[in-house]
Amino acid sequence: MYKKGKSRIVAVIPAYNEENTIENTINALKKISLVDDIVVVDDGSSDNTWNIINEMNIQAIRLNENHGKGYAIKEALKKIDFNYLVLVDGDLGETSSEIEKLIYPVIENVVDVSIAKFPQPKKKGGFGFVKKLARYGVYKYTGTKINTSLSGQRVYNKKVIDNMCYIPDRFGVEVAMTVETLRMGYTVGEIDVNMSHRETGRSIRDFTHRGKQFLDIFVTLIKLKFKG
């Protein structure tokens, strides 16, 4: 049972080149009274991200080079003491306050893990191959249909994290953590939120990003096959 002052809720933000949004993201999280600490991991940013977070009265961790989202999360886990882990992307801006909707179901023991379900995107992005691969992989390995397997906005009960054996370094992190959670028999809730973040389109840069994401998830799913 959650008791304020005895159970620690810590928010972790892995950030890479988020100078335009990270300050608003952090400030919105600070307004959530349930959150005890905010930890931001600068994953080798080449912009002004580090200078911004280093002046914001939160715990800031700096990595000298870009290792990947999963790696950044694992670095934070080495340095924090928590009962509930809140994962937040750095590009949410003011809408990061919506993460509060995910916290309650976990601290009230309704579910072990909650995942944010975003509204439909305003503009058309790619062709959905990455999302389809992620959903297929989660269903194949767990028999559970999860529509939010790529969502990085999550809240975990500590027991889930403590028993997790595989957290990949890069883009496959959400899929792997979802599969691991369900394989261990923990419960997952998908929560509707009014969050918004940076959307990708159909530029060469966007397709290159999605290609890397697809490959990382594909490799992650192969590794999960032998870890089941």
Image (spheres, helix red, strand yellow):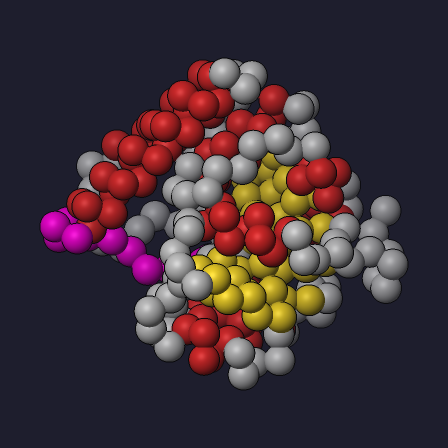
Q: How many marks?
A: 0
Kindly indicate the quadrant of the structure image that contains residue 15: bottom left
The answer to whether residue 199 is magenta is: yes
Dominant SS in magenta? loop
* Residue 97 or residue 41, whichever sits in front: 41
Residue 176 in view (yes/no): yes
Q: Is residue 38 above or below residue 144?
A: below
Indicate the position of residue 7 as horizontal and vertical percent values. 82, 56
Q: Quadrant of the C terminus?
A: top right
The answer to whether residue 71 is magenta is: no
Residue at left offset 66%, top offset 52%: 78
Residue 124 in view (yes/no): no
Residue at left offset 62%, top offset 60%: 11
Residue at the extreme left: 204
Q: Is residue 198 above or below residue 218?
A: below
Magenta span: 194-205
Indicate the position of residue 126 as horizontal and vertical percent values. 20, 42
212 relative to 194 in the view: left or right: left
* Residue 34 or residue 44, whichever sits in front: 44
150 relative to 100 in the view: left or right: left
Kindly indicate the quadrant of the structure image that contains residue 4: bottom right
Indicate the position of residue 197 as horizontal and vertical percent values. 37, 59
78 relative to 7 in the view: left or right: left
Indicate the position of residue 57 as horizontal and vertical percent values. 62, 80
Q: Is residue 202 above or below residue 146?
A: below
Residue at the extreme front: 64
Residue at left offset 19%, top offset 46%: 208
Kindly indicate the quadrant of the structure image that contains residue 33: bottom right
